[in-house]
Each structure stands twice: as C-alpha cells, then as structure tokens.
Image: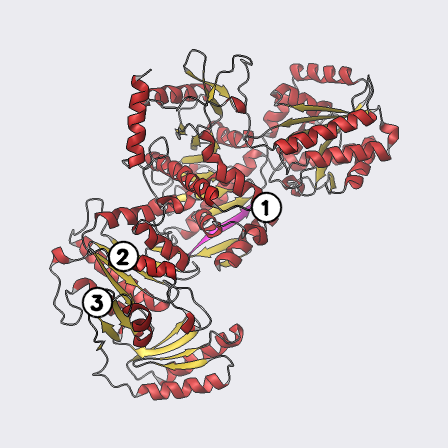
Amino acid sequence: MSRIEPSDFDSAPIKVSGRILNCMTQLPNQIYKTKNDEWDLKPLRGSSALHASNSFLSEHTKWEPHLIAWTGELFSYNENIPHSIPTNQSIENDPLYLSEEDKTRVTEKIHEANNDKNIHPVWLLRKDQERWRKYAENVIWPIFHYMQPAPSDGREEEQWWHDYVKFNEAYAAKIKSIYQPGDIIWIHDYYLLLLPQILRMELPQAYIGHFLHLPFPSSEYFRCLSKRKLLLDGILGANQIGFQNHSFARHFISCCARLLGYEVTPDSVHIHSSMVKIVTLPLGIDVAKFEHDAFTEHVESKVQTLKQLNGNRKIIIGRDRLDYVRGVVQKLQAFEMFLEIHPEWVGKVVLIQVSFKPFYHSSKLDKQVNELVANINAKYGSLDYTPVQNYNMRVNRDEYLALLRVADLCLITSVRDGMNTTALEYIVCQKETKSPLILSEFSGGASILQDCVQVNPWDSVGVANSINECLLMPEDVKTEIETKLYQSVSQNTNQDWTCHFLQNLMEIVVKLNSKHGTPYLNKPKLLKRYNQAKHRLFLFDYDGTLTPIVRDPNAAIPSAKLTGILQELVADPKNEIWIISGRDQEFLEKWIGSQFPQIGLSAEHGCFMKKAGEKEWINLTERYEMSWQDDAVELMKHYTERTPGSFVEKKKAAVVWHYRKADPELGMYQAAKCKAELLSRMASLDVEVMSGKANVEVRPSFVNKGEIVRRLVLNSDPFDGKKRDFNDIPDFIMCLGDDTTDEDMFKVLNSVEQDWMDHGHVAKDGNSGVFPVTVGPANKETVAKAYLADPRQVLDTLGLLVGKVSLFDTAGTVELDDRGHLKDSESALRSQKARLAYTAGR
C-alpha cells in the first residue's frame, strides 16, 4: 500500500490543510437518558469499516480527521433490560429540549468515549426522531436495491423529502462552521446525496469526495424517483464519486447521460465546464486488527463451546441484517431444499442464522422467516436435533468472531448489496481451518472474492447442491481456495481503500486546480435577497427557459403554472419584468403581452422592444440595411430541400433555419454545412451567424440580448439613453436563459456586477443581488454564476419567490436550529417558547 500524506502536496499548485472532514450518517455512540434523568452513551454497532478508516487516518498518518455525524435517535433507559437499548425503546414522551449545556456535556462524553476531540455531532432534536430517516430508508434505499415502493399520492413522500433536504442542510451548516481552506471533505452514503451540491454553492473551491456504499441501480429503476434530477445534481457537486464495483459506477454514468443529458466518459461526467471523476474502489477491512481480535484465548474458548454444543455436526453460519435484500428467506429456502434432496445430511448439519433488525424493518418479513424456520425444524428436527438455530439479536463481537471461526461453511445469499464485509471477515477467520464460502453473485463483494463458490440466490436447487459440494470439498481444494481468497482480502484492506480514494481525489483536484463547475442555484440565498430588495428586475428568455423545447415551435405556449406565477410577479409593484426572446413580435404579443401588459417585451434577440404598459413596438434596426435577408433565405431554402422536416422562418430582423422536426443526425450535419456557408457569404456584412436549439440563425450583430440587458439595467429608459441614478438601480436582478444567445446577457451582467463591486456598491454580505442563471443540461460552457436543470425547476424557483413552493423543495444554504426549523421563522419561535415553558415546568 502506498500511503498518502499531506506533505505529498507541498509543491502542488493547491493549498492542502492536512485536515479531512469525514461526514457519516451517525456517530459511533448511542445517546440515551438514564433512569436518573441524565444523558449517557453506549457504543453503537455498525459502520465499523468507516470508523476503522477514520482511526487509520488519525493513528497512522499525519492527516487530521474530523468526524461529522448525526447523533441518531436518542433513547431512554430500559429498566427491564438494563444492558440493552433496543430501537423500540425510543423516547416517546420527552420532546427532547436539550439545553446548550446538555449538548456540551454530551459532546464532551463523546470525545472521552472515543478518545477523540475532533468529533462534531449534528443535532436534530424532534419528538418524532425517525422523520430524518424516512426519505432515505423508504424511498432511496428500496429503489437502489431494485424494489419499487407502493404507489401513493405523494404527499407523505413530499414531507419526507423536505426533511431529507433539512438533514443535508444541517450537515452543511456544521461543516461550514469548522471548515478551513484546503480541507478535504469526504461524504459517505445515501443519507447525504445532496450535501456535495450544497457545499459547492458556499465553498466553490472545496475538495469534495463522495462514496456511495449502496448499489446504484440501472437508469430504468432510478428514473422512478420523482426527485431523480435533484439527487443526481446533488451528488455531482463532488469532485469525485466512488462506488463499490464497476457495474454501479456504469449505472450512475448512464443515468447522468440518459436523465440529465450530460456528456460522459467511462470514468467521468462533464458538468458546466468542469468534470467529476468516477472511481470504483471496493471497501476492505482492517485485516491485521481483525485477525488479531479473532485469534485470542477468549474467542478460542467460545469456539470450543460452540463445537461442544453442536457435537460432531457440520456448522453453517449466516449473519445478516433482516431486510428484503440480504436474502435470509432465500437462504432458508435453499437450506430446506438441501435437506430434501440430500437427506443423508439430516441430523449431521445445522444452520446458525443470526439476524438483526434494522431501524426500519418489516414485520411481514419477520413473520415469513419465523414460519420458514418453524417449518424446517418441524419437518427435519427432533428432540435432540434443531436444524435451524435462528437468533434475532445482535451478538457481541467475541461471539461473532467465534461463529466465523467455528463454521464449516459460511452462506451469504443477498439478492442485492453494496459490500458485505461479513464475507471478508469470514475469510480472515478461516485462515487456519480453511472452510469454504458460498457467496451470492449479486453481492458487492463478489468482485473481490472471485475464487469463492458463487451462486444465484434465486436458484434454491443450485444453492442446495453448492452446500453439499462445499461440505464434501477435499482439504487440498479448500486450502487452495482459502489461500487465494485470503490474498485477495489482504490486498484490498480498509487502509488501501482509504489511501486510494484520497489519492484519486487529490489527483483530480490538482489537475483541475482552480477550475470549478457552475454551481446549482442557491435558492435560499436568492429568496433572502428577493425579500430584502426594494426594486427587482427579472430578465427572462422564453423557449427552453419558461417553457420546454418542443418539436413544433408554435406549440410552446405558456402553461397554466407559468401564467399563475407571472400573475403573482406582476402584482408586486417592486417587480419589473422583461421577456427577451428570439421569438417574433406577433408570438410574444399574443401569448404574453395580451395577458400581461405589465411585462416588457423584446423580440428577435433585441431587435424590437415594447415597454410595459405601452402598445407600440420600437424597431432598433430600422436605420440599418437589411437586404442580406434575401440572400440568407435563398441559401437556407437550398438546405431545406435537402433536409426533410426543416423549414425557414423569416422574421423582421432575422432569418432562422429550423431542423427540430428533421432526423437529428441529418439535421446536425446539414446545420454545420449551412452555418459554414453562411459565415463565408456573410463575412463582409454586419451580421452574426449563430447555432441555436435545433436551428441556425442570422441576425444583425449590432443588436443582441446583451445590449438590451445593459440598457434595462443601467438606463432609466431603454430608448433615450438616460442613465439611472445609482439609488434607482435594481438591487435584485435575476436573469434566466438556456441558449448561446443568452450568454450575451450573462456577460453584460457579470461586467456590470464587477463594476459595482469595484466601486463598493454591494450589500454588507458582499452580495450584489445579481443572479445570472443558465437553464438546461450542464454539458455546456457558460459564464452564468449558477444553473437550473430545466424549465420545471425555473417555475419551481419563481414559485418559491412568490410563496407557492416550499423552501425545502430543493437544497440550499439555510440556517436551521437544532430542531430543523428555519432560524427566526414562526415555527422556530414557537419551538423556542415551548422549550422555555417545558424547562420552567420541570
């Protein structure tokens, strides 16, 4: 293993602080209230590989890791079972109004328990604590494991989504409070898919990596998620995304291409003039430590006890989380089939199945497993023989190690999982006895353990025969297989995984240096500025921005939702709204001007303008020679004849050749030829030849959208050239566009904003109130400061501003209190009053 150290980047063109902010789902401790009404801790099982990675960085490298994690649910002391705090013992009557002193004391206990002062709890205290898990566990987890949730009206899921957004925003706030330039931010798993994007909004220079420990489904399943685009864009805020095996990475890349239209390669996704690296790195275990713990005298005594209890019978062990993807049902069905088709093993073999229930478990599955166990034991058991010994519990570590060591066979039949570390741990424990492993081919570990016996868990007969073959396997074959498997596990340790992920991440960060992609629009910041502003200016493109691109341009009419939002915007006297489009006057007048006379209109990319409240259009090109149009039309007709489905549109100041209805490949080919010929013919004229969305357009170069924006922002009247008094300049400007022509608007706004900043004309928080936002797929160069994925997100954003959409529909940077309320909001103030009343009454 080649270790990576902070000093490796001393001569790099980037700053490296030497700190790693490790973001995990939950702390390594469970917080509970004792019978003396005090808060205390107990160790929490799970995520051992991640905590081992964090410990490795802390103890064996010069990195300074910081663990950032949610506290998890808080529990109460169970007097009946004092040494166990099961999940069903969650606090029901305590509203969890912890004071700052309480949280400080608990944090200090966490530091002492883990001998680590660099642990930062994320506090989200609510009576209904499980709310923070619901979207991740009820929506993301099933889809990622190829299970379709039951259909619903979506209202409950929408609330789960809002809590999921808040959960990610709470992490972002904690990270921002401790972040230093040069820190590496390493985010883990499916609870935090939005976090990379939120951080990128506020920390554009940050080095961010995300590792997904779940499988990633094919695009056919992933597209079933209603929030699919938001989730993909959320995780794409990272510089690097890691997966357990190649198929998961391939599915993710396919989703980015199919669902978002992004440009991809086999190991990267290109997004807004930057790229995100995709890596495949199977998670390993700490082999040396695990081997040391497994071969102690205490574990050895438990091994001997298990042997005595089971006599001379062969022992098959299984240890799984009791959910639908771990294949416990398939395992029991295969074992029953094994006893049926190989009756000679009845009385000579036992299956010890240890299952533990996750936070969200199915009582239906629990019942099915118990019925299978009862049927097998009733059919094949006797007074002195129990074929299946089923334990629904978490065994302590020594007992678990003893089970792995005593086994004659380990049976793992998961129907889908990311990385099953039980298989890796079993191989280490079998270093001496060399018993075989049967592993599902659908397990993430199958790519590492290629020499084990791999089975299809849905084929119970095949699994049954594999069990028989493994129990009869000659010693020399066992030794050969174990040697290969042990070598595979030893060459893919937890330390290797950690170093390889960091090495890959820093390689891409150094390569890109200061080049960062355009971030997603920070909607909470937009809303805050909107509410503070006294004079707002909206500058909208039309096609592809307010309405989606359609095959027939005449069908792109305003939706009812757009009409409703525009009505809300024009009703506010603080708002000045302009639509700056390539459309002609007739279309804009018919669909916008006739319904909303309060909206200013600019047609044909700025060649014609009509102020709000007026009826007359002003032709900004009437003084210029326009005879070039006839030549352009003639040339375009030549290509129309050769491209079925294409047509020519002659506007008053521009000529456009459309090929949206033509065969896409033929249209693009002919468009390239048409543009090249137009550029050649029009080279001496004061015109501009541009490629648009399935069109080629020729227009006057002296008028464009950028010049119109400059007039609207800086002039009190766009026609007379009179400059605005600075106090009359809009303090909120939102510009939205999706096309190449809209880049002119963004460039002008960036220039104006820079000029204002140079002269100190910005708010105290450094925000000028200028928001140039591009719309559409992220596989394009842009000078916009932020992006939205499609017109639907545009309408949701405008709906947010007028109070029709929740702030938590999409992620952003907000300030939350420790109960997930927006700070200083009505709900936060009510919560604060309730906290004071509760404290006073105690």
Q: Position of residue 712 (x, y in %)?
A: 20, 65
Q: Quadrant of residue 176?
A: top left
Q: Which residues are magenta?
A: 273-281
Crowd band around label 2 with a 10 angstrom C-alpha radius: few (<14), some (14–19), many (20+): many
Q: Secondary structure at mark 1?
A: loop
User: Residue 69 at x, y = what percent?
Assistant: 44, 31
Q: Is residue 9 above or below residue 516?
A: above
Q: Nearer the viewer, residue 631 or 602?
A: 602
Residue 240 in the figure: left or right of residue 379: left
Sooner in the amino-acid sequence: mark 2 or mark 3: 2
Compared across the picture, whether 674 is left or right of 842 comes to: right
The label shown at residue 569 is 2
Q: Which residue is mark 1?
A: 148
Residue shown at 37% from the left, 77% from the top:
697
Image quadrant where residue 582 sits:
bottom left
- Cα separation, mark 2 vs mark 3, equals 14 Å
Q: Residue at x 49, y 55 (%)?
A: 269
Estimate the spatial distance between the alpha carbons at disc 1 and disc 2, rounded to whole Å: 39 Å
| Label 2: which secondary element | helix
Residues under numbered marks 3 and 1 in contact, where contact means CB atoms less than 8 Å apart: no
Residue nearest the observer in this picture, 572 or 6: 572
Callout 3 amino acid: Ala
Q: Looking at numbered disc 1 in the image, what kind of residue is underneath it?
A: Gln
Let me know if residue 134 appears in the view. Answer: yes
Distance (Cα) linking label 3 and label 1: 50 Å
Mark 3 element type:
loop
Magenta span includes 433: no
Q: Which residue is mark 3?
A: 612
Q: Residue at x 67, y 23 (%)?
A: 391
544 sits to left or right of 446: left
